[in-house]
Structures are given as structure tokens and as C-alpha cells.
Amino acid sequence: MPKVKAEKKSRQHAAVVKQGILFNKDFGQHILKNPLIIQSMVDKAALRPTDVALEIGPGTGNMTIKLLEKTKKVVACEIDPRFVAELQKRVQGTPYQSNLQIMIGDVLKTELPFFDVCVANIPYQISSPLVFKLLLHRPFFRCAVIMFQREFAYRLVAKPGDKLYCRLSVNTQLLARVDILMKVGKNNFRPPPKVESSVVRLEPRNPPPPINFTEWDGLTRIAFVRKNRTLSAAFKQSAVIAALEKNYRIHCSLSNIDIPDSFDMKQKIENILQNSNSELKRARTMDIDDFMMLLHTFNVEGIHFSS
């Protein structure tokens, strides 16, 4: 019989298992073990002694302790009760105990408190919804320094015409300045993830752009369904026409505007695209200004992308 190779496990991984903590793949648990990268992330957040720091997925608390050393208070969101116990044990009897607030549960379903800065090594499967939860959070925070899957990080900073440019790119860049700070190899985590990682800095635009984000998101969602298609083709989908007509009729009803029996929403959309010279444009090459102009043109004509 052929020999079956034993699966290699790092000594540190074995030590954590010995403590009774097995990593939960459903929660995307990968503990950042390299102290130099943890320190670098904390440094790049430019923390102040008066700051409240938000950490998502603190795990065993390697980053949490560094944040507590630099700030007035740390709010740590953790979904796994085993890591909550580990974190509490780690600060027990130290001066930091009263400065740590632990929120137990799913961060996406949690109402976040006020914070100045977010520093986190997050579960990668919540990356996209978390980015927008943070960027739409009020009052504004100063910046976020977050570890993401590398391809996701590249999508965040992609420019019009880039292969990775997508709805995520344009939506994020509307709300924030985005920079990739450093690359992080998979061996800096335990257990190592299957993908490479990058640390990204997000700085919310304050004041925010004078735009309804739900409307904006509705427009970019239609345009990026097939980002290589022309806008004319994207807006010819029957589901798109039906949704926009429903919103238009609500708008007219609220504004006491009569709609003629011969009204044709498909034709109205075509006219708007032609009059704004947008019918042959493609989402993959359109920048924020292009989308702002298009949204304004539709809104002026009473067409809205959220009901």
C-alpha cells in the first residue's frame, strides 16, 4: 500500500489546538501571527492616545494588545465565543481590562458604535459588505487599515480600463480614498489561507459626495452586469425597464404628473442615453464623473434607481 503523507502542522497551530481552539473555516479564521506585520498595520493607522479603535475578528488578541497600548479604548467585534474567552483572559488583571469593549456577534448585523480608526485582519468572506458598512457609517471615522485577499484589494484600487475594474472599484472610490499599503504572504497566518493578502488603507471622503448612494448603487448595478456591454444594451433588459418604469410611475404619482397612455419607458431610456451621448459607453471605461453625470441626467427626467 502507498504511504499516506501526514499533514504538516506548525508548532504554533498545534499549541492553539492544545488550548482547545480549533479554527472554524465557516468564520474564515486565519490568525495573523507575524508581530512585524501587526506592528506595521498599527503604525500605518497613525493612532492617537485619544482614539477609539475598532477591531473586527480579534482572534486571540495579538493585534488587540498593540491597539490597547496606543489608544484610549478598543472595541473588538468577535463572533466566536471561544476567542472572546481567550481575549478576556488575555487582558484580565492588566491595566487594559477596562479599556477593552468586546461586542459578541456578526459584525454585519451589529450596530457599530462611534470609532476613530478601524484596524483589522478580517474574515475574507465578509470583505465587500463590510467595506460598505464601514464607509456608510456615521459619524465619520478617520481611516481604516484592513487586511484583504490580494485580488479583492486590487479590485478596490482598480481604475477605468483595468482588467479588474468593477462595481466594487467605482462604488468604493466614490466614498473613499483607497491605497494598498503592503503585500502579505500566506505563511504569515495560521492556518495559512489559500490566497495571498494585502493591507489596504481606506479614508472616507468627508464631506461625502452630494449623492444618494442607494441611487448610485442601483445605476452601477445595471451598468456592470456585463461591464463590456454598451449602456444601450444594458438598459434594454426587460427586468431593468420594468423596475425603472415602476419607480417612474411612483415618482409621477407623488409629484402629480400625468403619464400619457402612449408612454414608452424603453423609448424614454433610449432618448436619455442618446441625448447624454452615453448609449455607446461601456461601464469598464467609465469613471466616477461619467456615472455622476448619467445619474443626474436620469434623475432630472424623473427616473430613479431606488424606490
Image (cartoon, grey):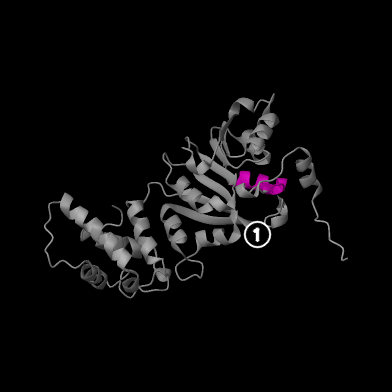
Q: Quadrant of the N terminus?
A: bottom right
State whether residue 97 is above or below residue 9.
Answer: above
Q: Position of residue 150 (x, y in %)?
A: 60, 59
Q: Amino acid at mark 1?
A: Glu
Q: Position of residue 71 (x, y in %)?
A: 58, 34
Q: Position of residue 256 (x, y in %)?
A: 12, 52
Residue reaching furthest to the bottom: 280
Residue 44 located left or right of residue 242: right
The one nearer the camera, 58 or 67, is: 58
Q: Is residue 36 magenta?
A: yes
Residue under circle 1?
196
**Residue 18 falls in image quadrant:** top right
**Residue 289 falls in image quadrant:** bottom left
Q: Residue at x 33, y 75 (%)?
A: 280
Q: Residue at x 50, y 38 (%)?
A: 116
Q: Is residue 51 magenta?
A: no
Q: Which residues are magenta?
A: 31-44
Q: Position of residue 129 (x, y in %)?
A: 48, 50
State whether residue 48 is above or below residue 266.
Answer: above
The total of numbered circles placed on residues is 1
Residue reaching furthest to the front: 1
Q: Secondary structure at mark 1?
A: loop
State whether residue 156 is above or below residue 95.
Answer: below
State whether residue 56 is above or below residue 90.
Answer: below
Residue 123 located left or right of residue 255: right
Overall secondary structure of the magenta section: helix
Q: Residue at x 44, y 68 (%)?
A: 160
